Image (spheres, rainbow, N blue to C red):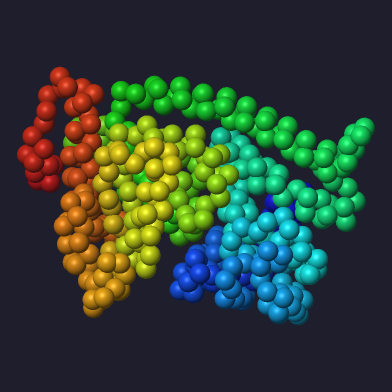
Amino acid sequence: MKKEFQYSKEKENQAAKAVLVAVSTDNQPPHKMHEYLDELEFLAKTLGVETVKTFTQKLEKPDPRTFVGKGKLEEIAAYVKAFEIDMIIFDDDLSSAHVKNLDRAIKDCMVIDRSLLILQIFTKRAQTAQARTQVELAQYQYMLPRLTNLWTHHSRQKGGIGMRGPGETELETDKRIIRDKITLLKKKLAKIDKQSAVRRKSRDRSVRVALVGYTNVGKSTIMRALAKADVFAENKLFATVDSTVRKIVLNNIPFLLTDTVGFIRKLPTTLIESFKSTLDEIVEADLLLHVVDISHDSFEEHIEVVNKTLMEINAQDKPTLMIFNKIDLFKNKEYPPFEEHPPATLAEVEEHYIAKNIDAIFISAAKKENFDTLRKEIFKKVSDEYYKIFPNHQKFDYNQLWLNEEE
């Protein structure tokens, strides 16, 4: 099973070659398909996989047998064979039947989908016992419904992952073993979650702030700048999988800032379920800092993805400050709600959000543009929460304190 769910050790020091495959349907127009493919290529790069070609096709809906049509499949198979491609990555989830039929048609090439690619990245990035357990659980949950096809792989590799028991087939044994493994991992995770809950309870008298947002929007860069401490930040998707907590003091008001895992479109549901305990940091936060990459063409959709995920974990009504990051990379462009007008400027975008009465700050974390304004806004909101916890503490004159600090 290592071949299917763990990036090959032999390939660790060299980039595997991959082709990407996507289908444009009535529910996914061509421009969206290409945008998702760009993101898929970035995901592959994050794992150290080199994309050498993309294949696309227009269909009413994906083919139930092979996802793509017969002619397109023959084209992909010929290219894979001619250029010794290691991996075919589909931008949507593949069923067990899809993978089985694709495996028959395309020999000696690993076929994976977007969900498995993301799981591979999480496996590589997870550092703590909690994150590693969560990822392993998500892998087995992903694996179970696809086990029928996986067994055809293992039969060629002389055996499956389990031993044959009396009256059981090998496949039934494997399913039982995986279900038992899932049960054990859930128990282990529950134990870790209890320990995490105890640690969070010890912080109950602290104001808690959580950075949330789409993946690769600059949350870790903002945290590093605010905390003035070493926090891992990299221009790759899911650079942060484990939650990171830092204590910060602004004008004598202390608070705890947590950097959480980024969200993404088409995020595997098994990962959302497995990482709900990590997302408790968001649920229990007093204030959310929702970071948005305003330079991205689809930043409005990214906002929707994050808001939808916040709704799934019942954190949508928390006090929130929108932080539009990367203004240094912003270019005038057409996007909702400005499609029918000339390309919108940054000033017009700011006016749009001000008109919607949304608390928003526009910054560049990398260039430190408007960072003082960001600190002041965070301080105002953290102060409100701080005096709810400690109502008898002397309230400081915010403006005077900040002026004294600047002097």
Above or below, comparing residue 59 to residue 390 in the picture? below
Q: Is residue 104 left or right of residue 284?
A: right
Determine the residue located farthest toward the right in the rendered image: 166
The residue shown at (73%, 58%) is 97
The picture quadrant where one finds residue 229 is top left
Above or below, comparing residue 98 to residue 334 in the picture? above
User: Residue 368 at what x, y percent from top left?
Assistant: 26, 57
Which one is in front, 214 or 317? 317
User: Residue 303 at what x, y percent from top left?
Assistant: 35, 55
The residue shown at (43%, 42%) is 312
The residue shown at (64%, 65%) is 89
The residue shown at (51%, 23%) is 194
Report if residue 231 is visible in the image.
Answer: no
Q: Is residue 190 left or right of residue 167?
A: left
Report if residue 174 is visible in the image.
Answer: yes
Q: Is residue 368 left or right of residue 29?
A: left
Q: Is residue 170 left or right of residue 291?
A: right
